[in-house]
Amino acid sequence: MTELARKALLPAGLQDVLPVVAAQEAQIREKLMASFALAGYDRVKTPLVEFEESLLEGAAPELAKQTFRLMDPVSHRMMGVRSDMTPQVGRIAATRLKDDPRPLRLAYSGDVLRIQGTQLRPERQFAQVGAELIGVSSAAADTEIVLLALEALENVGMPDVSVDLNLPTLPTRLFEAFSVSPDDREKLTQALERRDVAAIKAANGPVTDVLVTLLEAAGPASTALPRLKRLELPLGASEDLHRLVEVAERILASDLDAALTIDPVEMAGFRYQTGVSFTIFGKHVRGELGRGGRYRAGGASGEAATGMSLFMDTVLRGLDAPVAAPRVYLPLGVAQREARKLRHDGHVTIAALEGAAEAKTADAARKEAERMGCDFIYLDGRVQPLDA
Amino acid sequence: MTELARKALLPAGLQDVLPVVAAQEAQIREKLMASFALAGYDRVKTPLVEFEESLLEGAAPELAKQTFRLMDPVSHRMMGVRSDMTPQVGRIAATRLKDDPRPLRLAYSGDVLRIQGTQLRPERQFAQVGAELIGVSSAAADTEIVLLALEALENVGMPDVSVDLNLPTLPTRLFEAFSVSPDDREKLTQALERRDVAAIKAANGPVTDVLVTLLEAAGPASTALPRLKRLELPLGASEDLHRLVEVAERILASDLDAALTIDPVEMAGFRYQTGVSFTIFGKHVRGELGRGGRYRAGGASGEAATGMSLFMDTVLRGLDAPVAAPRVYLPLGVAQREARKLRHDGHVTIAALEGAAEAKTADAARKEAERMGCDFIYLDGRVQPLDA
């Protein structure tokens, strides 16, 4: 490895974001956050690290395994680097904002760090932009969060968005209702994850027919809804499925331009959801644009909540590549006052610097402007195209 | 400690940023970054962690002591959490952007983490917003960075800004020129840090008069400049002082509305600067708004560079407290399409949610709007003041 390559090397799953892309990421992030703010979601900012105990309180065991630990020399207690911001926002809701009226609407954006990437998401640092609706358990709340994600994506010009509605807790409810043995639960869960109908049928218990029907009902809302509405499920599972159907119908009744699919037994990627959940896709984008769903804010005994995160890396992949703003070269001798006026009018200026390139003639200045990647030059008190 | 207090507890120097303030921080950060972008400073984003070796390459030993370490289970190498972003930007300039034309102008924003706070800055996580000008060593470059910071602060409405120009390397140059012994250097450095003229005079060597004159020359540019221009210093030190004087005169010749002071022997807080440096203050703000100066990008053998960081916590302290945007309550039954139209027109909406508060009459909706902190209500197809 050359010295240069060695210096440039970053740990796997970490990266430098370079000009134009970094600006686009910030711009899209702020636009998404602006959409959340307009819907009454107040921005909070959580710390990069906090005590392990509070960071992981009520969090899924998977999250604990994904969290980097640091010893705090001040308190001599263990801290964790945030690997997800939703539990932190739940903590803020349960403590500092406990007296704020409910429903509490909060939004956040920031980078999280994970110990290992996944095959689908090799990044170990990625930027989340999210919103949480805390203190309401109704279908109206489930729907608001889905529509909020869709509206925000529409506002940044994301094309061809689709939503997949899921019920990641449904299999467990069915296992309980049908008294499925722990061994069979394990086998059936794996079969569901592989969408392996043959393996499910091989398990051959009373739950089998239901699971196969649910698997086969998955698809566009127009075909899935009638099938799911005909299904009779045991208590518990039945209520969950009714809720899923209600949320789907509410989303369809809104006039947002997104395709809706329903896959009731999809569980992959949901870690702490306790009810109606969803994944958002872009037609030509690898990986999901975002995901969310119902959970308990601050752990199992916490408030009813629903929320979602959008992932900046996939969101950016779904949008047109960024274009650099045109630049105006300012030759030596342009007064600070003039330069500031140009910037005030929205021009991106690249000022000549003594000591960098001493372009004393207009021709030399044009050459220097070109070398510096400018499209315009400020000459005779006017912004002129460089190729004029 | 109650259960609630325990849950709310964060490690010393770390904090949750709550609604309104978090939104203001983001807004001001993006405005500062927009000012940098208009002056041709391209945004980059650096990773939260990277290999210790590259993170600390060429960094001051003080920075190494302030950096949290993490073991990377993927590479089995030690990583560090960024405690300053300038060295990371220097690394990007020296590697990924090595072929970009110079001068290279880069900007960044992000949070850094330090192992311990200082008395002046107890925070261990704080947000930096900065700009680096890489590949030029001229006084014009020194001046551009100072003026860029002032222009950005002016654009966010910061009142009563002042700049203190410093030469943190000057004492060392003088110690070398006058062959001061290591013991005396230590004593004199401490005396300079305390601004203790008596202690400096007690050292009683040929360097004493010069140091006292420099200390006493410190003050507003109008009085300091004539004094400093009269001073005759040994080679090396003399060139540095000439540069300081030239930069001061260039700043005065610009028409930016900031007070300029000069304190050539101020060293506190400069860790890696190698030439003209500066600290920015707000008249009524505790702590500095920002600081910067000349250094080598990517360590001692790197490119000539100058840059600065603004600190979001002090910047926000210098601005008016944020005010929440007025909110419009949308009673039950407002169509999604209508709600979206209101947000599109810039209204912050708070939608009633079935399951949260079932306000079926206009009077009940007004009460609910008030409870939710709204100023307006959407009734009969119009946004109306709540107290109408």
Image: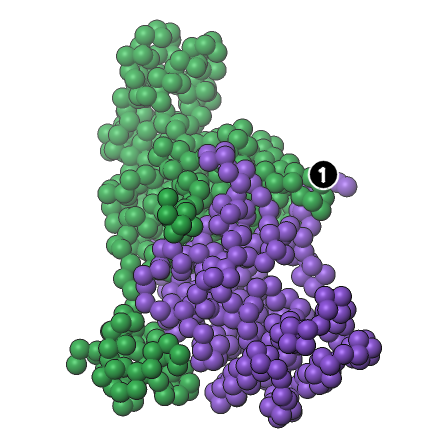
Chain colours: A green, B purple
Q: Position of residue B182 (x, y in %)?
A: 72, 66
Q: Nearer the viewer, residue A181 or B50?
A: B50
As displayed, is residue A315 above or below residue B203? Answer: above
Q: Quadrant of residue A204?
A: top left
Q: Amino acid at mark 1?
A: Glu
Q: Position of residue A86 (x, y in %)?
A: 51, 42
In the visual, does B205 lie left or right of A230?
A: right
Which residue, given by chain and number where applicable, does mark 1 sit on?
B3
As displayed, is residue B236 above or below residue B13? Answer: below
In the visual, does A369 lie left or right of B358?
A: left
Q: Position of residue A318 (x, y in %)?
A: 28, 48
Near mark 1 (Cα within 10 A), the count class, few <14, some 14-19 or many ≥20, is few
Q: Quadrant of the C terminus of chain A?
A: bottom left
- Residue A94 visible, this orientation: no
Q: Nearer the viewer, residue B101 or A194?
A: B101
Which residue shows up at 57% across the image and 54% down it?
A: B83
In the visual, does B366 lie left or right of B183?
A: left
Which residue shows up at 34% across the image and 78% down it?
A: A357
Q: Quadrant of the N terminus of chain A?
A: top left
As displayed, is residue A79 above or below residue B222? Answer: above
As displayed, is residue A251 above or below residue B91? Answer: above
Q: Quadrant of residue A353?
A: bottom left
Which residue shows up at 45% across the image and 20% down it?
A: A172
The subunit carrying tag 1 is: B
Q: State the SS at label 1.
A: helix
Outermost residue, left side: A388
Q: Position of residue A136 (x, y in %)?
A: 52, 41
Q: Nearer the viewer, residue B379 or A112?
A: A112
Outermost residue, front side: B179
Which residue shows up at 48% across the image and 70% down it?
A: B306
- Residue B102 visible, this orientation: yes
